[in-house]
Amino acid sequence: MNKKEKVTMVFGLLGNPVGHSLSPLMHNAAYREIQLDAVYVSFCVNDLEGAIRGIRALDIKGVSVTIPFKTAVLPLLDEVDECARAIGAVNTIVNDCGRLTGFNTDWIGLVRSLEESTDLKGKTFAVIGAGGTARAAVFGIRERGGVPVVVNRSEERGRRLAFEFGCRFFRLDEVEKVEADCLINTTPAGMAPQEETMPVDGRNIARFRWVFDVIYRPWRTRFLEEAEKAGAETMNGARMLVYQGAEQIRLWTGQEPPVALMHRVVREQLEAEKSGGL
Ligand SMILES: NC(=O)c1ccc[n+]([C@@H]2O[C@H](COP(=O)([O-])OP(=O)(O)OC[C@H]3O[C@@H](n4cnc5c(N)ncnc54)[C@H](OP(=O)(O)O)[C@@H]3O)[C@@H](O)[C@H]2O)c1
């Protein structure tokens, strides 16, 4: 075998389902822009252990990991970085000559998005949800010196997360008692095709200066529309998607990702979907 043979690098997404992911579009556009001889493909996985063996066997240089494997993948890796371990979820695997290391770039994506609106230090962030994305949010907010508060539908899960990270907890039906600078939805409530659902009632959104939704399909959730009506500064999850992907490119290639272009292709695709063009 010629170890020095130069072949197109392969990156991919492990998940199930994967059909609606914007990652292939975003990553492939980025590789073209930085003239990297690489492709990014989605793998709809039924056998996670087999897929992980396949990464090594096929010398796939790196993969993104999504629902439902972000936690299940941890014990299958050679190493898990400190942040991903604290969050309890891996969304990125780097393959270094067959040695697989797990990272979490969701928290970086989320924090960078928030930092476009405000410095996090000393501010309070009410995080709705207690799943993987909420864990990344709570971790990231704390990393940047902010104060997270957990708000969740199921009390047990919410309390567990709050206890683990030493923060306050409120049940979702107590959200009117929460005082914070920013309200963040990390639940799938409002995501297409359930666009009419909201994680909290509209009248509970009015008192927050910043309102952030991790959802980007639809581009504007009802939650964000209500927040805008109430005068809040809002942001959807598209920047988070771009920034978490940008960090993956840094980890996999060491190159600087073309963030503006990545954001543009994501936005254009979502706008085209909305208008029924694609
Ligand atoms: N923008 C991005 O780059 C990005 C990155 C990652 C994820 N996401 C999005 O983040 C969302 C959450 O993903 P996840 O992996 O964290 O999910 P998850 O682990 O399944 O957690 C979902 C959380 O949402 C709560 N929840 C679900 N439906 C709800 C409803 N109708 N009302 C109130 N709470 C509800 C659940 O509450 P219980 O505990 O009571 O069940 C749970 O705490 C998804 O929409 C995903 O697409 C976006």
Image (spheres, rainbow, N blue to C red):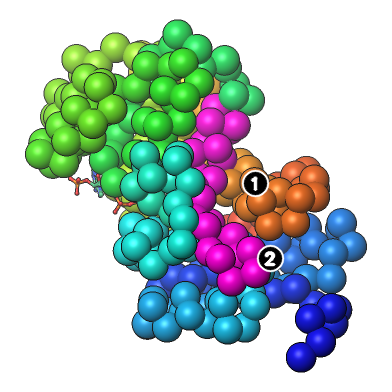
**Label 1 crowd bin: few (<14), some (14–19), many (20+), radius 10 Å:** many
| Identity of the residue drawn at 16% across and 35% down | 160
Residue 216 visible in the picture? no
Q: Based on the picture, tell me whether residue 11 belongs to the magenta stretch.
A: no
Relative placement, left or right, of 127 versus 259 is left
Give, as a three-letter code, the residue at label 2. Answer: Leu
**Label 2 crowd bin: few (<14), some (14–19), many (20+), radius 10 Å:** some
**Percent x, y for residue 2?**
81, 87
Q: Quadrant of the N terminus?
A: bottom right
| Identity of the residue drawn at 58% across and 33% down | 113
Q: In the rendered view, tell whether residue 156 sits above or below residue 219.
A: above
**Percent x, y for residue 39?**
73, 73
- Asked if the residue under mark 2 is in contact with the one under mark 1, i.e. CB atoms within 8 Å, the reply is no
Give, as a three-letter code, the residue at label 1. Answer: Glu
Residue 187 visible in the picture? yes
Taking the view exactly as shown, the residue that stands out farthest to the left is: 156
Taking the view exactly as shown, the residue that stands out farthest to the top is: 122
Mark 1 / mark 2, whichever is N-terminal: 2
Classify mark 1: helix, strand or loop: helix
| Identity of the residue drawn at 87% across and 57% down | 34
Q: Which residues, given as a range, are shown in magenta?
A: 91-114
- Distance in Å between CA atoms under marks 1 and 2: 16 Å
**Percent x, y for residue 120?**
51, 17
| Identity of the residue drawn at 39% across and 76% down | 48
Q: Which residue is mark 2?
A: 25
Closest to the observer, 97 or 107: 97
Q: Nearer the viewer, mark 1 or mark 2?
A: 1
Relative placement, left or right, of 260 versus 156 is right
Relative placement, left or right, of 218 versus 75 is right
Relative placement, left or right, of 278 versus 175 is right
Q: Which mark is residue 107?
A: none
Q: Which mark is residue 247?
A: 1
